[in-house]
Image (spheres, helix red, strand yellow):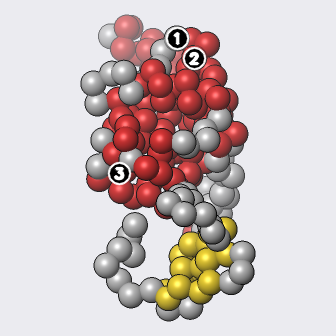
Amino acid sequence: AEHAGQGVFLRATATRIKIVQEGKTLACHERCFGREQQILNPWHYLPVLERKPGALRNGAPFVQWDLPSPVRKVRDHLLKQDKGDRAFVEILLAMKTHGSELLSVACELALEHKTLNAAVVLNHVNRLKEPPPVRENPVPGHLRLQQEPQANCSRYDRLREVRHGQ
């Protein structure tokens, strides 16, 4: 979708069609020989959904979209709500980023808890994904402590006694 209106090359073989721009393959599809048939990949249209989430309800690429069962159940529930299509597009963006398995589990958790909205599903996604590895930031030598502080509560007690004793 982001290449719409730009020049591309079409490379057709007996079984596949490739769309290429400046040596980079943008899309690759199986060739379709039947009349009045289309092979559409919904993931290619995700940038369009970001701008026009209403296309999710009736857009040709999304009508027969084969989504995992929990994701489909969440979609069906969200599309019944006002602005549910926009919420489901947020979930789809997370699916593209984190993968369908992680998102399926997040949708299952949301279904179990009967809290079906994009924020809850995305919260489950964030809880399920592995945290990024902690990077060690070495302290430069001139900033290292020469003498480690001692935990000494008696100093605090002495200060308290002096104030109360006055």
| Label 3 crowd (10 A; few <14 / some 14-19 / many >=20) | some
Q: Which mark is residue 111?
A: 2
Compared across the picture, whether 95 is left or right of 160 comes to right
Horizontal and vertical percent for residue 12? 62, 84
Compared across the picture, whether 35 is left or right of 151 comes to left
Q: Residue at left 70%, top 39%? A: 101
Mark 3 near mark 2, Cβ–Cβ under 8 Å? no
- Per the image, the residue denoted by label 1 is 114
Q: Earlier in the sequence, mark 3 or mark 1?
A: 3
- Per the image, the residue denoted by label 3 is 50
Q: Residue at left 38%, top 8%? A: 165
Horizontal and vertical percent for residue 52? 29, 49
Q: Residue at left 43%, top 35%? A: 88
Nearest the viewer among 32 and 113 is: 32
Q: Residue at left 67%, top 75%? A: 16
Secondary structure beneath label 2: helix
Q: Amino acid at mark 1?
A: Lys
- What is the spatial separation of the Cα atoms under label 3 and label 2, in whole angstroms? 24 Å
Q: Amino acid at mark 2?
A: Leu
Mark 1 near mark 2, Cβ–Cβ under 8 Å? yes
Looking at the image, residue 45 lies above or below residue 141: above
Quadrant assignment, res 100: top right
